[in-house]
Amino acid sequence: MYGGYGSPPANGYSYGQQQAAHAQQPPQQQVAPPPAMPGLAPGWSPARCPTTGNTYFYEHASGKVSWTAPAPVAVTALPPPANHEGYSAQAAPAEAQDAWAAVQAHIAASRSGQPPPQFTQTTTSTFNQAGAPKRRGGDLSILKKDLESPPDVLKWRQEREITVAGGCDTCYPKFEDAPLPAQLHISLKGAGFPTPSPIQGQAWPPALEGRDVIGVAKTGSGKTLGFLVPAFKRLCGSGFPRPCQSCAPKVLVLAPTRELATQIEVEARKFGAALGIKSVCCYGGAPKGPQLSALRQGAHICIATPGRLNDFLEGNMMGAHAVEYLVFDEADRMLDMGFEPQIRRIVARCPGTRQTLFFTATWPKEVRALASEFLSEPVVIYVGDTSGALKCNTDVTQAVYVTRGPQVKDRLLQECVRKEVQAANGGVCRVIVFANSKRLCDQLERSMPRLLQLRCAAMHGDKDQFQRTQTLEAFKLGICPVLIATDVAARGLDVKDVRAVINYDFPGNVEDYVHRIGRTGRAGAKGNAYTFFTQRDDRKAGPLIKLLEDAKQPVPDELRSMCRGGGMGSSMQFSGGGGSYGGGRRAGRGGGGGGN
Ligand SMILES: Nc1ncnc2c1ncn2[C@@H]1O[C@H](COP(=O)(O)OP(=O)(O)OP(=O)(O)O)[C@@H](O)[C@H]1O
Ligand SMILES: [Mg+2]
């Protein structure tokens, strides 16, 4: 009979003590225990909460419920997540309450002889060997830097300015070092890549071990394969991937824009198709039918924007219960205020045993605390900087012009583009012009072709998906060499041979500045960035100066005086010089919000 919930299992945690009410229940009918699970103590079985995906261990004879696998187990047991330890249902966060309710329903059903409706029997997860929920939370800023790795690993990191924290003592300087399927090695070599890029060489080892990873590396440094390659290996093991259930992908990659999601899908197909891995891209603004049909055929990898993914999940058109590997590309953008509520809903549906990876070029403090909620004891990797401070790609030459008024900006825009066209010397001269509002993008799309004598096309959130796709395709092909865009094009887009980026308006924050100018100077190429700065941007003068100085770029005197004039912190040290254009300190034509 069920003997109450009093004593915790030898190697586990019982929640029964908080649930005294259950001890007074009437005698229950005997239920035959399930067959013993290999590796688990007799009478114990794992059970998964459908709401949270967390795996529990449940003893049929006593009704004890434990986060950790009771001895003897072949795998290391994990401690329970901090926020679940000794909880009472009232005080517990929503997730724990749901989970506990599901556990209780399971126990009640078992007691009454009914088949347990809420749990499915499950073997331990392939991704988290303990099969127990991972410990999430914790302060990511106090992680200890790894200084005790073997000397050759430390040397390789030092040469590439890589800082690692969280416990990882390997790296893969060469592709041959990585235990990947032979076909994947062939594809990577076939792409003409000489070695893994620094973020790849450092992120692959912990990711392949099943660790959670935060990877921060400059724009254009190969982060996409940084997270896709371990996903391929996970799916394939040493052979071909097993078929996925319909509408239940095992790998989920979240990206902030449709264009970026599509680009990741292209990369996933390029390197994954030969391995038999099926990918699907789900984004809003396009018909749901073809996306659902690909999901139904059992896609292994789903690359999605949060809005469309939530539509599918909440409409029960697909499930996140099989997700073992969850990636946030442009992680800081995904966690900022715009996306956070949607992200929380998605993550709540993914199993607690999943592996989670965050990749970005910018990692502001504001999002780090939030990130820790979704990650479990991550390995944190910074490439190119030891402090984690915001940095620009130093392959981009930056010029900042303090300007006023749209006429000055238009004239300046012409000069910059002309200069780039001359330097291209007859070759295709791709330039991206960023403006802050959709309206301004449309205005520039009308006025610029005549002034520049080049074809220009605008891309922003009010353009329909067909127009956006056509515009980007024309830009990639060089048919339309000037792309005028809002921040929909700021993150992640990888177009070959973009010679220059022009910030007609300064973006809303310096992180976006770093991403915008990162559309040029990618994968070792060089590029130019021209930025028009006005008085209305003065609050961003300080952080911009810091970025320019760190990247050893000239700082215009006018920009310095804006900063001194009351913009940013007086504690900053300034050096170097630069030029200004158009003088004045009055606001020019800003973009004014409008975002995407
Ligand atoms: N090992 C490698 N060696 C050389 N080039 C590579 C390597 N891996 C990827 N690349 C190329 O580098 C380019 C940039 O890669 P990717 O788009 O993944 O950069 P990213 O770090 O994600 O940049 P962003 O921060 O802008 O999103 C791509 O064209 C990709 O094909
Ligand atoms: Mg990227």
Image: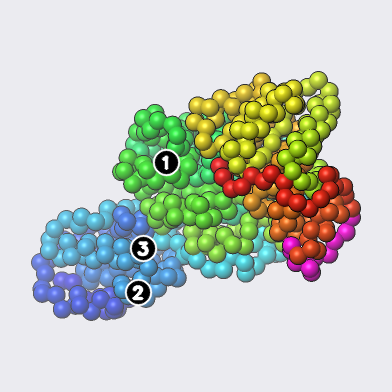
Residue type for callout 1: Arg
Q: Residue at x 31, y 73 (%)?
A: 90
What label sits on residue 142 in the rendered view? none
Element class at badge 1: helix
What label sits on residue 91 in the rendered view? 2
The residue to which callout 1 is attached is 308
Q: Position of residue 270 (x, y in %)?
A: 56, 30
Most frequent secondary structure within the magenta stretch: loop
Question: Where is 491 relative to 366, above or below?
Answer: above
Asked whether disc 2 touches disc 1, contact meaning CB atoms under 8 Å apart, the reply is no
Question: Where is 576 relative to 8, above or below?
Answer: above
Element class at badge 2: loop
The N terminus lies in quadrant: bottom left
User: Relative to 405, is 314 on the left or the right?
Assistant: left
Element class at badge 3: helix
Q: Position of residue 167 (x, y in %)?
A: 61, 62
User: Relative to 280, is 16 on the left or the right?
Assistant: left
Which tag, 3 or 1, sits closer to the chain's start? 3
The C terminus lies in quadrant: top right
Magenta span covers which residues? 567-576
Residue type for callout 2: Ala
Instruction: Determine crowd level at label 3: few under 14, some 14-19, many 20+ residues with C-alpha closer than 10 A.
Output: some
The residue to which callout 3 is attached is 95
Q: Residue at x 78, y 61 (%)?
A: 563
Residue type for callout 3: Glu
